[in-house]
Image: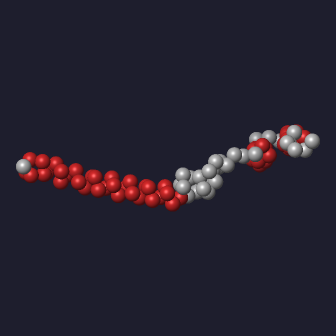
Amino acid sequence: MYWYGGWAWMAFMPLLWIALICLAVWAVVRLTHGSSGGTARRGHGWDGGEHRETPEEIIDRRYASGEIDTDTYTEMRERLAAHRPGQR
């Protein structure tokens, strides 16, 4: 009985152990570093929670990258300041 299925099981066992070890390593890394993989990506905090950019941060980023010019930047910042909640 062992002889007929034994060789197939012996060939499969190393693959099973490799898969289980990889799964365990992945789970430990995922649990210790959160869903961001241990680095703070744009739009994600260290804890894996979503960080949404404020309109001011978006304008600052676009100005810093050269996407908008100084006049547009100033105008957009003034418009945001005028429409900011709680400033009436």
- Quadrant in the picture for the C terminus: top right
Q: How are the colours assigned in the image? A: secondary structure
Q: Where is residue 33 in the image (x, y as percent from the top left)?
A: 53, 58
Q: In which quarter of the image is residue 83?
A: top right
Residue shown at 72% from the left, 46% from the top: 53
Coordinates of residue 80 in the picture (x, y in percent): 85, 41
Q: Which residue lies furthest to the right in this view?
A: 88
Residue 66 visible within the image: no
Picture coordinates of residue 25, whole percent (x, y): 41, 58
State left or right for residue 32 relative to residue 11: right
Left or right? Give the position of 43 relative to 84: left
Q: Is residue 50 visible?
A: yes
Query: How many numbered circles does the render carry?
Result: 0
Q: Is residue 23 left or right of residue 84?
A: left
Residue occupying image coordinates x 67% and y 49%: 51
Residue under the image location 7 percent in, 49 percent down:
1
> Is residue 62 found left or right of 46 in the rendered image?
right
The percent position of residue 21, horizontal first and vertical second, equals: 35, 58
Q: Which residue is drawn at 39% across and 57% down?
A: 24
